Amino acid sequence: MLEVEGLKKTYKTTKAVDGVQLYLNKGESVGLLGPNGAGKSTTISMMSTLITPTSGDVRYNKKSVLKHPDIIRPVLGVVPQEIALYEELTAYENMRFFGKIYGLSGRKLENKVDEVLELVGLSDRKKERIKRYSGGMKRRINIAVALMHEPEVLIMDEPTVGIDPQSRSYILDMVRKLNREKGMTVLYTSHYMEEVERLCDRVYIMDHGHIIASGTKDELKSILSGEETVFVEVQQMSLKLVEQLVAHEAIQKVTEVEKGYKVIATKGEDLLADIFKLASTIDVKITGIHVQTPTLEDVFLHLTGRKLRD
Amino acid sequence: MWNMLKKDFLTISRDRSEVLVLLVMPFVLIAILGFALGGINQENQGIAEIPIALVMSQDFDQELQDFEQRLEDEGFPREMINQVIESAEAIDPAIMLKNLLLAPELEGAIATETGYQSTEAQQALEDDQIAAIITIPEQFSYQTLIAIYLDEEPNASIEVKVQDYEQIRSDVIESVVTNFVDQYNFETSIALATEGEAVETALNNEAFGETTYLSTRDPVSAFQYYTIGMAVMFALYVAATVSSNAFKEKETHVFARLMVTGEKPIRYLISKAVAATVLTALQLAILFILSGLLFQTFANQDLSFWLGVSVITLSFAVTVGSVATLLTAIALQFNNDAISAAFSGGIVTIFAFLGGSFTPVEQISPVIRMLGNWTPNGAVMTAYLQTIQGLSFGAVMPMIYRVLVMSIVLISVAVFIFPKRRLA
Ligand SMILES: Nc1ncnc2c1ncn2[C@@H]1O[C@H](COP(=O)(O)OP(=O)(O)O)[C@@H](O)[C@H]1O
Ligand SMILES: [Mg+2]
């Protein structure tokens, strides 16, 4: 339904987005995962016709959005990364204002405002000015405004940045509900892999302006199928142990974590036994050990050698 | 569009500091300046009444007949002569001067005696009974009329003879007469211009068409002066308020959000122009009405006065709207609100000074007045004051045209600067 083709955006010296390729099918929930500065917001701005790409195009039902920006605008609900609301106005006034911009009026407008307020759970606070709201409440109204015209596609740019866990959980549930119950197509941008893992069917992983991996969650994790992650808890940290571990032929990477080490290694039968043996030869006491199934975070780490939240 | 305007009104009216700047401050200043300067302007305290003699050597009726004869000799058609004679009576300088000197406003300052013959007056001056003689010579009316209508050099002038022992008194009398002459030239030129032909003429070689606020007929009170002065000055702040507000919309990304909805940039810009225009009109109306109610600033004014004031107010509001549009275009295009700050921090003050908001600048220098009349606030201030002085609507039209042309220029530049397509 919505396709992005070879999208590029260059600012003077920085290539913010460098040849992004992605698509959304109707009713899908798709994640766009990447660290800060990866180019996610820039990609979204181009998809929503806010900025013009240096090259490439966005197509909606095969039609160029670049040439006909008006075909996509009523279809899209965009939740910007920033709280884009009038702080001096109440939630109710903000929603009415944007509702009217989208051409709603009268009873229909009132009903929609009520319905969306109900959805974001702020019906009882609607007469308060935005500036008196908590961060989480602002985020919810920020989303509410994008829902006023019942968009077919909802694009959310890091909608949970900097808010309390309850609000975050509320928002995630809400987005899931919109996707599952209303059949809304969702593009969810985040640098929190847990969120994307919980919400999305398919995921694009982005870094330095490129899509570095894409597929369903399982497909992506199968990139790591030949590997396993082992946490080794020790009584005392030991450089010698690290040296020994790195020297092991199956082990690719050792990182220090709290109270121990995270070891990424090629799957093999004797790995755990080998680790115990190594430790005992240099008198390091292992207090715990467990094997973890890979996360998208691990996929990112594998692909880039960095953590998402560096 | 109403949706956009309502949003602007709500956001601005809920900002307490904006309300303070736009309504409370000018009102407080009107009160302070009005009370503080009211006494000085009106009561001439400290100067004893100056006795003067007005000697009128001419015979107006006779001279008018001579003038009529002259017009006939020149071969003008009859109806035209009748018309000229009719208006000539209204603009006879001798009668106007006499009325001025006997006007109640000068009571307490100048006591005019009109009963003297020339020689008696001379004697009285020598005897110190009077401080000055103002003589209107024979043929004065006749000479003035042919100067105005037939474009000949005037060769009769009002003579002011003062005792030279007391400088202040003679200064007062001379300034009254000079002001009269200036004003007379001005009003005469307007009277003629509005009848279809602008006749360039001069009385006693005074500069032609000079504006002065010290009208002979309806003097402007301190409250009137400062109500207008402060209102036009603070109206300029509306422009900066609106453009700052627009910049805030960009900064908080609501502007981007609006653009994503498909709202056209040009419509957004127009909404700013309209918002500033309506806000200015409201602000001025509130200030005028408050000042009128609390200080009786505009007591006993008739409908045509209010009509004139309304037209000037609306024209000025449109001009402020276009200033706001330009500031908005600049702030959004260059992604920097320094322009609004520079405008409200410096330009407004300079404009307000030039325009005469703080003091009647023509008393400092006519050049400043002339410059001031090229600022939007100065131009409308002149128009307002002329209306208060009772000048006809036609007389203030040039200033209104002037600000409307400024508006067109400002808006054109704004539209040119403002990005037509999408914006981040
Ligand atoms: N208007 C701009 N001018 C210059 N550089 C920009 C601009 N917008 C974004 N960038 C740069 O482009 C890169 C991608 O930014 P962004 O799309 O905001 O990343 P993300 O949303 O993934 O954090 C960053 O390096 C950023 O500094
Ligand atoms: Mg971003």
Image (cartoon, coloured by chain):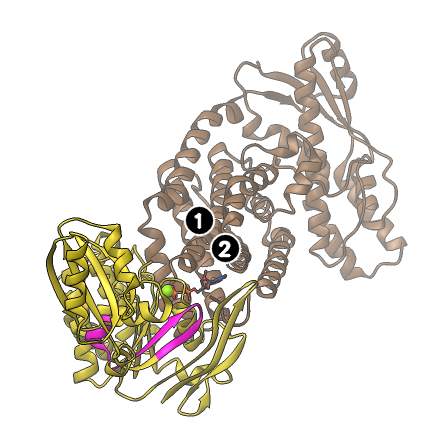
Quote the CA–CA distance across marks 1 and 2.
9 Å
Q: Are marks 1 and 2 in contact (CB under 8 Å)?
A: yes
Task: From the top left corner, tell me how far across and down residue B133 is, in percent.
Answer: 73, 20
Say which residue label 1 marks.
Answer: B284
Task: From the top left corner, tell me how far across and down residue B78 is, in percent.
Answer: 80, 60
Q: Kindly indicate which chain is depicted in brown in the rendered structure.
A: B
Along the viewing direction, whichever of B399 and A297 lies nearer the viewer: A297
What chain letter is assigned to the residue under label 2? B
Q: Which mark is residue B317?
A: 2
> In this rendering, does residue A198 appear at all?
yes
> In this rendering, does residue A161 appear at all?
no
Q: Is residue A29 magenta-colored?
A: no
Q: Looking at the image, which residue is at 59% across and 62% down? A: B417
Tag 1: residue type?
Leu
User: Do marks 1 and 2 share a chain?
Assistant: yes
Stretch of the chain drawn in magenta: A195-213
Mark 1 lies on a secondary structure that is: helix
Q: Quadrant of residue A263?
A: bottom left
Q: Quadrant of residue A34?
A: bottom left
Q: Is residue B371 above or below residue B180?
A: below
Tag 2: residue type?
Ala
Q: Residues within 10 Å of mark 1 (few under 14, many from 20)?
A: many
Q: Is residue B284 above or below residue B130?
A: below
Q: Is residue B100 left or right of residue A265?
A: right
Which quadrant contains ligand 2? bottom left
Shade representing chain A = yellow
Identify the image quadrant of the N terminus of chain A. Answer: bottom left
Q: Is residue B167 left or right of residue B336?
A: right
Q: Is residue B80 above or below residue B154?
A: below
**Mark with earlier residue (1, 2):** 1
